[in-house]
Amino acid sequence: MTTGFRILPAGDSTIVVEFEERIDPAINARAIRVADAVQAAAIAGVRDVVPTYRSVAVFFDPLRTDCRRLVDWLVGEANRSVETPVGEQVPISVPVCYGGELGPDLADVAAFANMSADEVVATHAHAVYRVFMLGFMPGFAYMGVLDARIAMPRRQAPRVRVPRGSVGIAGGQTGIYPAETPGGWQIIGRTPARPFDAERPMPFLFKAGDAVRFVPIDRSEFERVASNKEGRASL
């Protein structure tokens, strides 16, 4: 018997476990729980495990992995995952300098929300966000769920360059650009923290399932931390 999921092949070397199609912390917790179980089981031939908002992709070597046994095992783990609660966590604090040249879309988000810029900042910084998944580029964490009042859609015309550390909004999500890249999210601030740094012992600042809180800082504090390599590395 299956509960709220299905298992699908994606070619001859990938199996996908799909849960209900919505952004929901409880559903995401099920996906992460299954992904963690696959990693812990060290199943012969499994090459990679990728959790998303509501699914898990398991990549394997078809010459080394018994596909039928893997599917049966995944059914058992997916059924057990329904009992996994969303636990309380200590949030990772991320400093953000909002507005100005570091947050060029803050005024547009304020107009969209019929709020002042300060109210948008307070609303964005008040919540504790869940890291639903990592993707797009190394270290880019898709976080939610954003307050609906400030959940402005993506820009119609993406920017060619979004600076590293930019904090953006796109619908019900918020996130940090780990590197300079094109992007269409509404940029409301910037952090000196580095979501990905290959020089750190642990390159990724976030993992799926983490809790994150944004902490407003002023421009002088941003510049102080951004110029301090040791400070950046600790964030």
Image: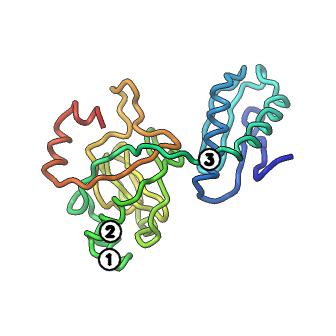
**Badge 3: few (under 14), some or many (20 or more) residues near its Cα, within 10 Å?**
few
* Outermost bottom residue: 114
Q: Which mark is residue 101?
A: none
Left or right relative to 64: residue 152: left
Nearer to us of marks 1 and 3 is: 3
Tell me the residue at 57%/48% (across/down): 86
Tell me the residue at 78%/44% (across/down): 7
Return the residue nearer the eye: 128 or 44. 128
Q: Distance between the residues labelled 3 and 2?
A: 31 Å
Return the residue nearer the eye: 94 or 9. 94
- Residue on which disc 3 sits: 85
- Residue on which disc 1 sits: 115
Nearer to us of marks 3 and 2 is: 3
Q: Are marks 1 and 2 in contact (CB under 8 Å)?
A: yes
Left or right relative to 89: residue 224: left
Residue 103, given in percent of the width and then of the height, sits at 27, 60
Left or right relative to 5: residue 22: left
Vertically, is 234 above or below 136? above
Q: Which badge, 3 or 2, comes first in the chain's sequence?
A: 3
Q: Which badge, 1 or 3, comes first in the chain's sequence?
A: 3
Return the residue nearer the eye: 177 or 217. 217
Return the residue nearer the eye: 27 or 228. 27
Q: How far apart are marks 1 and 2 (CA)?
A: 6 Å
> How many discs mark residues in the rendered view?
3
- Residue on which disc 2 sits: 120
